[in-house]
Image (cartoon, rainbow, N blue to C red):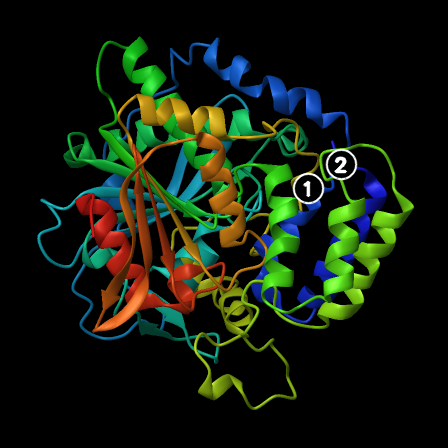
Amino acid sequence: MRNSTLFSLLFSCFFFSLCCSKSSHEATQLLKFNSSPKSLKILRDNWWNLIRNIHQFPVYVSSQDGQMEADKIEKLPGQPEDVKFDQYSGYVTVDPTKGRALFYYFVEAPQDSSSKPLVLWLNGGPGCSSLGAGAMRELGPFRVNSDGKTLYANEAAWNNVANVIFLESPAGVGFSYSNTSSDYQNTGDKSTADDTYTFLINWLERFPQYKNRDFFITGESYAGHYIPELAALILKNNAANKNTIIQLKGIAMGNAYVDGDTNDKATYDYLWSHALIADETYSNIQSNCNFSSSVSNADCDEALTAAQNEIGNIDMYDIYAPICSTSSNIKASVQPDPCASDYVDNYLNLAEVQKALHATVHLPYPWTACSDVIGYWNDAPATLLPTIQDLIHNGLRVWFYSGDQDSVVPVTSTRYSIKMLKLPVESQWKPWYTNDQVGGYVIGYKGLTLATVRGAGHLVPSYQPERALTMFSSFLKGKF
């Protein structure tokens, strides 16, 4: 794996730029994961064999009678007037013996919800909230005002074209919990996939009208692990059950962390190509750093320290965005507001908000954007590329999309990862448009599409909501 000295420096470099902005929780969490010890490598490399050879059935399924009606949200505190869609939230038990339950927030389309597809959104981390980021800052129907108490409408919300579930997973993230505290110390990719699958089976019992609906999985960052792993489990269990329980049609991953060693190299290529580090520093990193090696290298450490000093205090999620600062007047004129995560934290910790959301379990800690209770991450594959290759071979629609101003999981990382799949090009690189402006670029490979989103950071729908909606709508259609 990677040597701890190298990654402590890498973490310091990024943390310095993130410490003044709570908006970068996912990046901080991802870097913590990336600096995990070498002993994790064995489990990472054997993860796919593990999941391939274990049959998930029987899955825990409980009666959901009356639960859908009980989960309906009458009104969120401070929401705009004249909301024209139904919204639901609550808990779904995934392990009754241990008392483990996952929290979800679900918004239906305001028009023709009965004919629109069902979409699951997953944020990454690992261990970050899809409610706090995905729903409240990115693609959900509302965003939080600076007062931390009221909401305003997101006109480019993805529920304009789909019915969207936001899931806080695994247990210990957001409002999701377990009554068995050891669960928080035994979390990893496989348990997360298993619990998310169990959630979906029970959720479809609670909302049976969606059982035969086309289903898609989307998300970002470390969801580059969650999404293909869950998709593989769904396909395997559909086959094992001799029945298509979940009508999975495709996956879309934004700035997705799918191959660790590729991402490490790609980050510094991106930083240099965007004039954030010096030529000499970049040359020294290229010459002295082997990101797949476990051998300590003083010259590499020195080069990374130089890069840390050269980058300065910027938002690595979006290299051109301002950071949150109480002394700055820039907040009012910049979108997205760099302090938006602070407003979300305040809102989701209001007692009246938690009551409206049916988040009625009294946890011994406040809601946070990324989990402070999940401990050691037990298992994760070093690369998801073999899994993605299998999904392509099984005919699943696979899209990568990438905000081109993110340096945490940059577009260079996504392009290097796709190159490793060795897929033939079927449609050449071309621009795509929103409101007569270039929204990004797209290239079609055999079984896979890559779309960039111009001017977007790591949280693509937050930085470029209209362009993100155009991209997402195109994904649902299968073409631009």
What whole-number distance in Å separates the C-alpha atoms at marks 2 and 1?
Answer: 8 Å
Earlier in the chain: of badge 2 and badge 1, it is 2
How many other residues sit within 10 Å of disc 1, few (<14), some (14-19) or many (≥20)? Answer: some
Quick one: 211 or 296, which is closer to the camera? Answer: 296
Look at 66% across and 28% down and name the residue there: 378
Residue closest to the far bottom: 329
Q: Report the disc number at residue 108.
A: none
| Kind of residue at disc 1 | Asn
Look at 54% across and 37% down and name the residue there: 171
How far across and down, in percent of the image, does residue 180 sit? 61, 29
In the rendered image of this protein, does residue 130 appear above or below residue 336?
Answer: above
Q: Secondary structure at mark 2?
A: loop
In the image, is 154 to the left or to the right of 262? left
Residue tagged 2: 2
How far across and down, in percent of the image, does residue 433 sit? 24, 65
Look at 56% across and 70% down and name the residue there: 342
Q: Can residue 371 be spotted in the picture?
A: no
Q: Can residue 214 be spotted in the picture?
A: yes
| Kind of residue at disc 2 | Arg
Quadrant in the rendering for residue 262: top right
How far across and down, in percent of the image, does residue 107 sit? 26, 53
How far across and down, in percent of the image, does residue 14 sit? 70, 59
Q: Secondary structure at mark 1?
A: helix
Residue tagged 1: 34
In the image, is 381 to the left or to the right of 67? right
Quick one: 88 or 395, which is closer to the camera? Answer: 395
Of badges 2 and 1, the one in the foreground is 2
- Are the residues flagged by discs 2 and 1 in contact, CB closer than 8 Å? yes
In the rendered image of this protein, does residue 10 appear above or below residue 79?
Answer: above
Q: Quadrant of the N terminus?
A: top right
How many other residues sit within 10 Å of disc 2, few (<14), some (14-19) or many (≥20)? Answer: many
Quick one: 426 or 25, which is closer to the camera? Answer: 426
